[in-house]
């Protein structure tokens, strides 16, 4: 391979990396949507799989807090926003969480985060 070919390849690789790491504005990203499945006819890129929990404690002592579904979904949207994703697809319904044999106040959700381009006209 020639020196010119190596330089062009390196330049292309660097430009692709720079584009991938570029921050997208809030306006371009749009609202974070929690959907059952990916929208058809729209380009989407998987960003990350996340597992979030809401609620603390076992309910026996004063330091516990019952999980709230609304808070869990708010936190999912916040995690998506942090990672520049605009679509959340849950793996299933949020599940109650318990550990070490005690009833738990926790609620757990697993989801995939995607960045979808809703601005493209079909």
Image: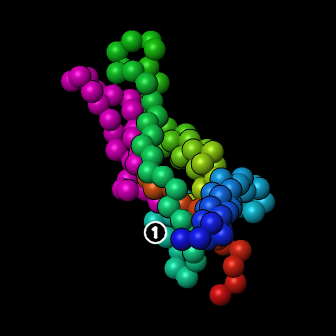
Image quarter hosting the C terminus: bottom right
* Helix, strand or loop for disc 1: loop
Q: Quadrant of residue 79?
A: top right
Who is closer to the viewer here, 82 or 110? Answer: 82
* Left or right of 101, for residue 80: right
Who is closer to the viewer here, 5 or 118? Answer: 5
Q: Which residue is pictured at 60% across the width and 48% down the height?
A: 83
Who is closer to the viewer here, 77 or 10? Answer: 10
* Left or right of 58, for residue 43: right
* Left or right of 60, for residue 47: right
Farthest residue in the left direction?
101
Magenta residues span 89-110
Residue that badge 1 annotates: 37
Q: Which residue is pictured at 63% across the width and 66% down the height?
A: 3
For the stretch drawn in magenta, the main secondary structure is strand
Q: Is residue 44 magenta?
A: no
* Left or right of 33, for residue 22: right
């Amino acid at each position: 391979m020639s020196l010119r070919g190596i330089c062009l390849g390196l330049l292309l690789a660097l430009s692709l990396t720079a584009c991938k790491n570029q921050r997208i504005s809030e306006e371009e990203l749009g609202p974070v949507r929690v959907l059952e499945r990916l929208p058809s006819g729209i380009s989407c890129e998987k960003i990350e799989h996340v597992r979030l929990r809401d609620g603390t404690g076992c309910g026996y002592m004063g330091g516990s807090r019952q999980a709230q579904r609304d808070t869990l979904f708010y936190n999912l949207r916040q995690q998506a926003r942090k990672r520049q994703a605009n679509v959340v697809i849950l793996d299933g319904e949020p599940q109650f969480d318990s550990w070490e044999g005690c009833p738990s106040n926790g609620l757990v959700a697993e989801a995939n985060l995607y960045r979808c381009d809703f601005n493209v006209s079909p």
